[in-house]
Amino acid sequence: DAMVIQNPRYQVTQFGKPVTLSCSQTLNHNVMYWYQQKSSQAPKLLFHYYDKDFNNEADTPDNFQSRRPNTSFCFLDIRSPGLGDAAMYLCATSRERLGQPQHFGDGTRLSIL
Amino acid sequence: AQSVSQHNHHVILSEAASLELGCNYSYGGTVNLFWYVQYPGQHLQLLLKYFSGDPLVKGIKGFEAEFIKSKFSFNLRKPSVQWSDTAEYFCAVNANYGQNFVFGPGTRLSVLP
């Protein structure tokens, strides 16, 4: 059974039109992460939540925001997508931040028209 | 800041050949080490992990990795690869003092039937 679920698998949006990507988990993990992965590159961490505590990476553009309304759900909001934001977006969870493997969802591939 | 390097961008092998993928990290303290695999069109899956103890760790699908602290390395090995091992392989490091994973750039493995 899928434990980290991302919806949708594929998302197409227009340049500048806000878009929201969804992630849910059945693992009851404390930590939820959002990564951006471009073709043939390593996943790049955008931010993570430890419970309700939001932690932004220093180089994450302001265009990217996140919400975690409860333990199970986490959202990635892109306020004004540019062409350079086309990528695979990965959600992951872990029980704790240190010393724990991360469990990944299938990802959402975002295309910008 | 911690960094992770992987020696090869693309490795091409024939079936039954032996595999070794290199991974080196820059952090000098206590680390947790991981190898993830990403099959075409699928999510990242954990192959194996090292936290402490025996530096030779065994993972799923016949993979193993050896942690050599003096060399800051965590190389992935498999004695005999199969066509189904064709995938992207990512090494990741999580330092005990820090909060986040750092992924290496990945190595694409192509196994020829």
Image (cartoon, grey):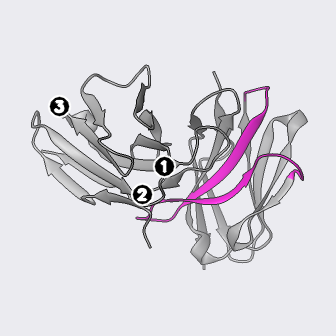
- Residue B53 sits inside the magenta stretch: yes
The amino acid sitting under disc 3 is Arg
Distance from label 1 to label 2 (Cα)?
9 Å
Residue B94 at x, y = what percent? 65, 37
Q: Earlier in the sequence, mark 1 or mark 2?
A: 1
- Residue behind mark 1: A93
Q: Nearer the viewer, mark 3 or mark 1?
A: 1
Residue B74 drawn above or below residue A15: below
Query: Is label 2 in a helix, a strand or a loop?
Result: loop
Position of residue A60 in the picture relative to residue A41 (left or right): left
Whether labels 2 and 3 belong to a single chain: the reply is yes
Quarter-wise, where is residue B7 in the image? Answer: top right
Q: Earlier in the sequence, mark 3 or mark 1?
A: 3
Point out the stretch of residues depicted in magenta. Answer: B26-55
- Residue behind mark 2: A105
Q: Decide if residue B112 is in sight here.
A: no
Residue A79 — which label?
3
Identify which residue is drawn at 67% across, 73% down. B14
Q: Residues within 10 Å of mark 3 (few under 14, many from 20)?
A: some
Of the pair B11 and A99, the residue shown nearer to us: A99
